[in-house]
Amino acid sequence: MANKKIIWSVHASDQLKAVLDFYIVRNGNINYSLKILNEIEDLLKALSGNEFIGRLTSNKTTRVIPMKVYLIFYEIHKNQVKIVSFWDNRQDKNKPFSI
């Protein structure tokens, strides 16, 4: 099985950026944000080689991988894996959830 290219939707990219920016402001440095990015990179390397490692969600198209307090939602396409949402589980429970 060949490795698939990983791409990020604009929505997922914006969600990730918001999480990283939050920790930069809260901590006054980029160290924790870089740690999150390194963990994501490691997980995406594994996902690139085996796109079925995530659990299928109820919509039967999207898969999800838990990563500590985050959920990475993705969809498999012919030659790529598209990250459609990066969800922080600690967000306000009343905030609208979207994939």
Image (cartoon, helix red, strand yellow):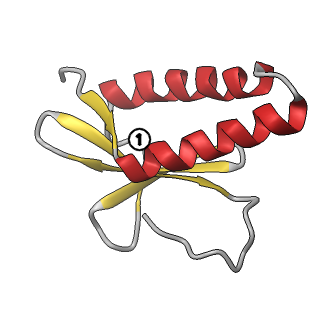
Q: Is residue 47 left or right of residue 24?
A: left
Which residue occupies the foreground of this view, 16 or 57? Answer: 16
Q: Residue at x 71, y 49 (%)?
A: 69
Residue 79 in view, yes or no: yes
Which residue appears at 69% of the width and 59% of the height?
89
Q: Quadrant of the N terminus?
A: top left
Exactly how many numbered labels are in the figure? 1
At which x and y percent is residue 63?
A: 38, 55
On the rendered image, what quadrant is the C terminus found in?
A: bottom left
Point out residue 96 in the picture as x, y percentages from the top left corner: 57, 76
In the image, what residue type sits under mark 1? Ile
The local crowd at label 1, few if under 14, some if 14 to 19, many if 20 or more residues have their Cα within 10 Å, is few
**Residue 75 against residue 57 in the figure, above or below:** above
Decide if residue 31 is on the left or right side of residue 21: right
Q: Residue at x 33, y 31 (%)?
A: 50
Residue 42, given in percent of the width and then of the height, sits at 53, 21
Instruction: Locate residue 47 relative to residue 69 in the image: left or right.
Output: left
Residue named by callout 1: 53
Residue 46, image quadrant: top left
Relative to 82, say whether 79 is above or below: above
